[in-house]
Amino acid sequence: MVPQSVKALVFCISTPTIKTRVHFYPSAGSSTGHHSIACLFTLFGKGIEKRSVLLDGGRLNQPDGVRLEDAFPHLRTEASGIFGLEIELSCQQGRIPLQSSLAAVELVSAQSTVMYMSVPFSPVGVDPSALEKAGVDGQAAAPRRQSFMGIGLQDSAFSTSLVMINSSGESVRPAISHRSGEHAVPLQVGTLAADSAMEIPLEDSLFKESVPHECVWGLARAEKVSVDANSITPETAYYLMYRDAATKRPLSVCAL
């Protein structure tokens, strides 16, 4: 069975100084043609009502994008903070596998622009493991991610935070750990509420046993942060965001 809809979870920031643009590229791998693609954006998070907007006019193998406040005008006046965004791509044309589609999020401020890639798209309403075993149209299906690890950094320039997203209607308790030497130590992140996005700064205590490295700008410490495979679902996503230690301006983001 070829899924006709795929989705990916990202986070966006909307404040008086930071705005978000979302770019997406509907792709069917080696398949050619420019079939019509519908893109459904669903925004959710603290202080806002969960809302969806359908963007028409998309085409397979053609990049597209939108300023988030144009799709959700209430972001200009009603809400400020960090939010979750579900991007769902669908094609009514049969047998068009969309798992190789891409999405990128651009965090724009007057000082700089930061762009990051989303977690991989996953099928909607189809067991990904079944697709992996069966393949799509005789080709290997997109492999499930095997690595859920990132690097937390702490120095005079960087601070690191963990961003967790839950698009389901139920709360979840993610299993996340960091490595202290050779041992994995649970990271106390609490419970992630339904339809929410949460940013948790990695505290100084997390790095107290990390070996410091002398860099040209001073001492730097690094710690591995990993998400248990059982906590990765189509309704959850996890990112590490690196901010300027002084201004707290986003500098970089990577998916776990």
Image (tube, rainbow, N blue to C red):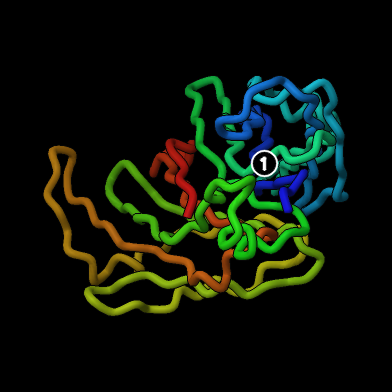
Image quadrant assignment for residue 57: top right
- Left or right: where does residue 133 sit relative to residue 54? left
Residue 51: percent from the left, percent from the top? 87, 44
- Left or right: where does residue 128 sit relative to residue 38? left
Please name the residue shown 73% across and 59% down the image: 126
Image quadrant assignment for residue 80: top right
- Left or right: where does residue 52 sit relative to residue 133? right
- Left or right: where does residue 151 sit relative to residue 256? left
Please name the residue shown 60% across and 64% down the image: 129
The amino acid type, in three-letter code, at marker 1 is Pro
Residue 19 visible in the picture: no
Q: Nearer the viewer, residue 232 or 212?
A: 232
Please name the residue shown 38% across and 56% down the image: 150
Give the crowd class for mark 1: few <14, some 14-19, many >=20 residues within 10 Å.
Answer: many
Residue 112: percent from the left, percent from the top? 48, 23
Tag 1 secondary structure: loop
Residue 207 sits above or below residue 93 on the image = below
Residue 130 visible in the picture: yes
Q: How many marks?
A: 1
Q: Which residue is mark 1?
A: 97
Please name the residue shown 81% across and 65% down the image: 169
Residue 96: percent from the left, percent from the top? 71, 37
Residue, far front: 138
Residue 181: percent from the left, percent from the top? 22, 74
Residue 51 sits above or below residue 63 on the image = below
